[in-house]
Amino acid sequence: MTSPTVFVVDDDPAIRDSLALLLETAGIEVECYESAEAFLDNHDGLRPGCLVLDVRMKQMSGPDLQAELVRRGCHLPIVFLTAHGDIPMTVRAMKAGAVDFLTKPVDGGKLLELVQGALQHYRQVMDHDQSMASQRERLMTLTPREREIMGLILAGYSNKTIGRQLGISHRTVEIHRSRILHKTEVSNVLELAHFALECGLTVEGSGTPPTLV
């Protein structure tokens, strides 16, 4: 993964310079932007990191930028910078998913603490998303019949019962079962159940063979 960057967006050049110096001194890569529009023009939504974002700017506000990033599917963690009079606006931004906010003048130590926490959280989210994508890719390798049998296995049916319900031999069920475990890269039914849960799958149906949805 590309090294994370802290994107500082503030229309006050003195604040941008002081925050950049603080973060760079701590060994953190920094990019500064004078407006939300300038940031949007230069950020592709894919680069890892976090935002240190002023709430009130001359054109697009910090919360407006937050909303636009969400609309674009970009979920960079945000630490808001706010004046005391902007606290109600910042509280709304927090409810929309911001990490935290600091009032100006900013406490350097507290900012570094929040930024490090935001970057760690972002890495965890990205690792989880990559794991989910890998699991779903494995799920897609299953044939329709294998998905059907997987659902029956997770519903607690024995190989013989599955064979009777599907009109196939229990040996054929065993072969499908082995292939399912191999393709999903798990060792047993308990791990298969965990895999299904992580993929967001549920088993439904009671009187009829359950299916995965």
Image (spheres, rainbow, N blue to C red):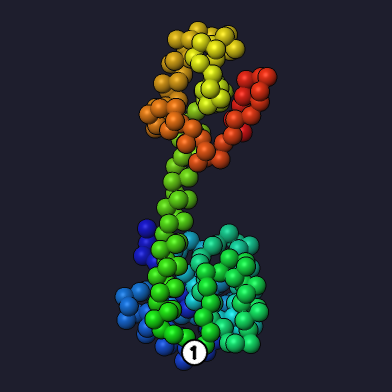
Q: Nearer the viewer, residue 156 or 139?
A: 156
Q: Quadrant of residue 49?
A: bottom left
Whole-percent x and y of residue 143?
52, 25
Residue at 68% across, 19% down: 207
Please give left or right for residue 173 compared with residue 167 in the image: left
Task: Specify few, some or many for label 1: CA neighbours under 10 Å numbering under 14, 14-19, or 20 or more.
Answer: few
Q: Find numbered disc 1 in the image and state the secondary structure of the residue it sits on.
A: loop
Q: Where is residue 44 shown, x and y percent of the image?
A: 51, 65
Tell me the amino acid under the disc marked 1. Answer: Pro
Image quadrant where one finds the C terminus:
top right
Q: Which residue is mark 1?
A: 105
Relative depth, front residue between 70 and 190: 190
The number of discs equals: 1
In the image, taking residue 84 as reference, residue 129 lies left or right, namely left
Q: Is residue 26 above or below residue 15?
A: above
In this view of the protein, which residue sits in the foreground, 153 or 51?
Answer: 153
Q: Where residue 144 sits: x, y (%)?
A: 56, 24
**Residue 2 vs residue 136: left or right?**
left
Q: Is residue 6 above or below residue 148?
A: below
- Say if residue 4 shows up in the picture: yes
Q: Residue furthest bottom?
A: 14
Residue 196 rendering spot, x and y as whole percentages: 51, 35
Quadrant including the N terminus: bottom left
Question: Is residue 60 among what the camera can see?
Answer: no
Q: Is residue 6 left or right of residue 86?
A: left
Q: Residue placed at 63% from the left, 62% from the top?
A: 71
Specify the quadrant of the image occupied by residue 37.
bottom right
Q: Residue at x 44, y 30 (%)?
A: 190
